[in-house]
Image: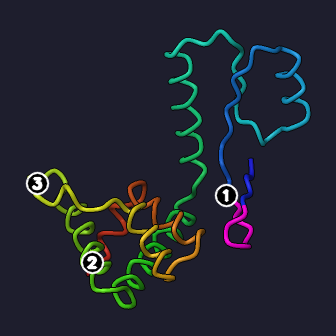
């Protein structure tokens, strides 16, 4: 499904997998008929927490599989370019925090003390505030945990 929002006069569009939970069988049938491809799954109530968790995990796995290696490579390159931009054009404080996040991500699992570095989402919001990123670029930067190993191998910072 494509969800659109308005942000500072710009239309932001994001593909988001939608899982519907409803107690109305006729609504489920109507959704299946009218929104093929938009709604990835429909669960009828009552739904146990185990069923819901399984459905969400399946949707997330399918959504991640949908990204081909070429698409993932393109996303990683864009993320790399955004990080470079933050380091080159950002304020000293933003550069410092970006480098802390990179260091923390690289050292994860090696007993790093940089665990209190800001998240990529927080850095993206900060960069938006400084006027370095728009909403779409900030969302892309916030996805780094999903693509982190390849982005970090490029040696930013």
Q: Alpha carbon of mark 1 to alpha carbon of mark 2: how far?
A: 29 Å
What secondary structure do most residues of the magenta stretch adopt? strand
- Give the mark, 2 or 3, whose residue is nearer the N terminus: 3
Tag shown at residue 5: none
Extreme-top residue of the structure:
46
SS assignment at label 1: strand
In which quarter of the view is residue 157 placed?
bottom left
The answer to if 59 sits in the magenta stretch is no
Extreme-bottom residue of the structure:
88
Instruction: Find disc 1 in the rendering and name its residue.
Output: 14
- Give the mark, 3 or 1, whose residue is nearer the N terminus: 1
Q: Position of residue 21 (x, y in %)?
A: 69, 23
Q: Position of residue 31 (x, y in %)?
A: 85, 30
Q: Alpha carbon of mark 3 to alpha carbon of mark 1: how far?
A: 35 Å
* Viewer-side residue, 106 vs 70: 106
Closest to the camera, between mark 1 and mark 2, is: 1
Q: Residue at x 54, y 48 (%)?
A: 64
| Magenta region | 6-13
Establish if 68 lies above or below 41.
below
Q: Is residue 6 left or right of residue 129?
A: right
Instruction: Find disc 3 in the rendering and name its residue.
Output: 110
Q: Is residue 1 left or right of residue 101?
A: right
- Give the mark, 1 or 2, whose residue is nearer the N terminus: 1
Instruction: Give the class, few, some or many, for how many residues have Cα within 10 Å of label 1's Cα (few <14, many ≥20).
Output: few
Q: Is residue 34 left or right of residue 131?
A: right
The answer to if 8 sits in the magenta stretch is yes
Q: Position of residue 30 (x, y in %)?
A: 90, 26
Instruction: Find disc 2 in the rendering and name its residue.
Output: 155
In which quarter of the view is residue 79 placed?
bottom left
Q: Position of residue 130 (x, y in %)?
A: 46, 81
Q: Residue at x 25, y 61 (%)?
A: 105
Q: Are the two marked residues, 2 and 3, in contact with CB atoms closer than 8 angstroms?
A: no
């Amino acid at each position: 499904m494509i969800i659109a929002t308005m942000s500072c006069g710009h239309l932001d569009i994001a593909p988001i997998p939608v899982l519907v939970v409803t107690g109305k069988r006729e609504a489920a049938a109507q959704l299946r008929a009218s929104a093929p491809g938009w709604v990835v799954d429909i669960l009828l109530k009552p739904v146990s927490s185990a069923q819901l968790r399984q459905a969400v995990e399946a949707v997330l796995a399918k959504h991640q599989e949908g990204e081909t290696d070429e698409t993932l490579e393109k996303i990683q390159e864009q993320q790399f370019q955004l990080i470079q931009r933050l380091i080159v054009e950002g304020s000293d404080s933003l550069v410092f925090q970006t480098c802390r996040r990179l260091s923390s991500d690289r050292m994860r699992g090696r007993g790093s003390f940089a665990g209190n570095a800001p998240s990529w989402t927080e850095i993206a919001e900060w960069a938006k505030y400084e006027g370095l990123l728009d909403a779409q670029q900030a969302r892309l930067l916030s996805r780094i945990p999903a693509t982190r190993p390849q982005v970090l191998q490029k040696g930013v910072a």
